[in-house]
Amino acid sequence: MQKTRPFWFLLDFYAWVVLILSIVTAFLVGQWWVVLLGLIGYLLALLVDLTGGRALGRTGAMRLARAEQENRELKAEQARLLGGIQERDEKLEKSKNVGK
């Protein structure tokens, strides 16, 4: 069983940087609604972190890498099979044209 990390989102460095910079900007400019942009930036940084797989931990990242490799292999196999089907269709078309 994998160990859960319930507060992983608090450990994201880039998200905190975005939020802190928005607070500093709001303080300097005097427009506190800028903090809302920082909050949106915080959430976007978390989303990027999730899609990149960094929030998965070591075992999750390994599983993600394995799944991506398997996906690449399956796409290569699919391309090989489609190429074979196209070659077969071309041979059938040539044999039909020769028979006429």
Image (spheres, grey):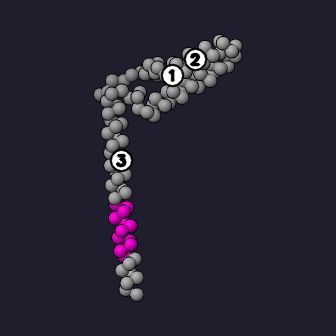
Q: Is residue 91 magenta?
A: yes
User: Residue 77 occupies which quadrant of the picture?
Assistant: bottom left
Label 3, label 2: how far apart the Cα atoms are: 39 Å
Mark 3 touching mark 2, by CB under 8 A?
A: no
**Pointers 1 and 3 in contact (CB under 8 A)?**
no
**Which is closer to the viewer, label 2 or label 1?**
2
Please, what is the three-letter code of the amino acid marked with disc 2? Leu
Within 10 Å of the Cα at label 2, are there few (<14), some (14-19), or many (20+) other Cα atoms? some
In the image, farthest residue toward the right: 30
Residue pointed to by mark 2: 21
Number of numbered discs overlaid on the protein picture: 3
Q: Would you place residue 96 above or below residue 54 in this image?
A: below
State which tag comes first along the sequence, 2 or 1: 1
Q: Quadrant of residue 27?
A: top right
Q: Which mark is residue 15?
A: 1
Is 42 left or right of 56, judged from the image as shown?
right
Q: Earlier in the sequence, mark 1 or mark 3?
A: 1
- In the rendered image of this protein, does residue 30 appear above or below residue 12? above
Across and down, in percent, residue 100 comes to 40, 87
Amino acid, disc 1: Ala
Write the start and end of the magenta stretch as one range.
81-92
For label 2, the SS is helix
Q: Is residue 40 magenta?
A: no
Residue at image location 37% in from the left, 57% down from the top: 79
From the image, give the main secondary structure of the stretch colored magenta.
Answer: helix
Rendered location of residue 65, percent (x, y):
34, 37
Which residue is depicted at the point 36% across and 68% down? 87
> Amino acid under label 3?
Arg
Kindly identify which numbered label has been placed on residue 72: 3
C-alpha separation, residue under disc 2 versus residue under disc 1: 10 Å
Residue shown at the point (55%, 21%) measured from the top left: 18
